[in-house]
Amino acid sequence: MDTDSPEIEALNFVPTESEAFNFKIWLSNYNYSNPATSLIVNSDGTITQTNLGSGSIRANTASLSNSNTAYYLTTTKEVWKTTDGGNSFQQLTSFPAPSQGTATDIFTSSYDPSHVWVVINNGDMSAQCNDSSAWVRVYRSFNGGQTWTYSEVVDPNDYCLREVYRGDAYGNVVYIGGRGQGVGGHWDGVIYVSNDGGITWQRDWSHNELTGPNASSAISSFATPELGSSAGEVWYATVERRSITFPSAYPSLRGILRKQGGEWSYKEIAGCAGCFSGNDRVEVVDIAVDTWDPNLVMVLVEGHSLYRSATGGDSWTRILADTTVDNAWRIEPDPTMSGHFWLAGKIKRKT
């Protein structure tokens, strides 16, 4: 008999300060029929489970520099925080949740857990460019959630940002990605960057730069090495394919973006046994880069296949097939051992 475990929507993995090989895995149960639940796996194998507020968990985040501090964001726009490794949680009632909009992501700076950002979308791709009721807000706190302010991400160059799915930060450099309405009215993957902690924003990349106006995609995740000289210097982002028909110049657009010191470059997942072909609809849903090696990248596709690149995306190997990785949605590097990664998702098991 096949049985399903709860869906694991968010995965964060940090070592503790006291012992180099002691760690916590921060998980969340993302299921609209279940309460908002944090699941913490300790290095000794014990699991701590805590129900948080109303709704269900949308995302969680923990800083690499402090394994005892983590934040959780619920679908009802509540922000919860722990500072004692998950033994207790407090709702941050200081968070000025808007009455409208959808909570999509929460993330911290890699080395400062007092810096935290929350993304709220109000509107979708059906909204017109001149619809003032549609907006994307990035809330920020630089004091651990005691006080908050926000910026609306507005593009002055005739580009309508409509939905942001994921964000990431290293220091005051913040990236957010999603999709918007560009030239021709198509849904385009787009990346915005802030170099001042989220106060001001500028468009850093859009799908049209590759394919022109007749395409559809979205940016679904980001990654940067957490330690070493490349931390915050090399960035990756995943590109989900959102339509069947593409221009002949880029018939697939299913891969990743890499940025190092300049512009984003596109790296297609191709050239390996089991790679995509034809008009396969491909969603590259998550990416992880090794904690120390900026060229070692793992990519999770459609919650099934797992791909590995040791060349920064220039060449690929499929290491797990669809039947092996069933409905996994998150992958993270192990901060204690180079070359090790953790995978989480909705796991099917035989009984």
Image (spheres, grey):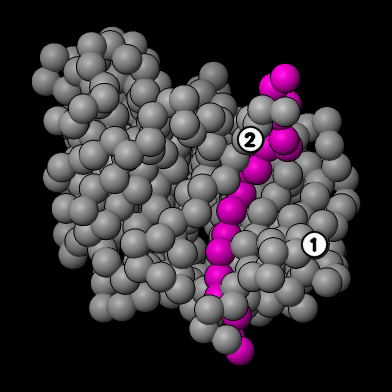
In the image shown, does 240 or 4 lie closer to the viewer? 4
Task: Tell me the quarter of the image containing the N terminus.
Answer: top right
Assess whether mark 1 and mark 2 are in contact (beta carbons under 8 angstroms): no
In the image shown, does 262 or 42 lie closer to the viewer? 42
Residue 229 visible in this rendered orientation of the protein: yes
> The disc labelled 1 sits on which kind of residue?
Thr
Residue 39 in picture, x, y percent from top left: 74, 55
Q: Residues within 10 Å of mark 2 (few under 14, many from 20)?
A: many
Residue 96 visible in this rendered orientation of the protein: no
CA distance separating discs 2 and 1: 19 Å
Secondary element under disc 2, as helix, strand or loop, is loop
In the figure, residue 108 lies in which quadrant?
A: bottom right
Residue at the image position 78 percent from the left and 42 percent from the top: 56
Residue at the image position 41 percent from the left and 70 percent from the top: 337
Determine which residue is flagged by label 1: 48
Determine which residue is flagged by label 2: 346
In the figure, residue 248 lies in which quadrant?
A: top left
Residue 175 in picture, x, y percent from top left: 41, 56
Residue 65 in picture, x, y percent from top left: 53, 80
Task: Tell me the quarter of the image containing the C terminus.
Answer: top right
Q: Is residue 16 magenta?
A: yes
Magenta region, main secondary structure? strand
Residue 113 in picture, x, y percent from top left: 59, 76
User: Disc 2 or 1, which lies upstream in sequence?
Assistant: 1
In the image shown, does 330 or 155 lie closer to the viewer? 330
**Magenta stretch in the rendered image:** 1-18
Residue at the image position 76 percent from the left and 55 percent from the top: 38
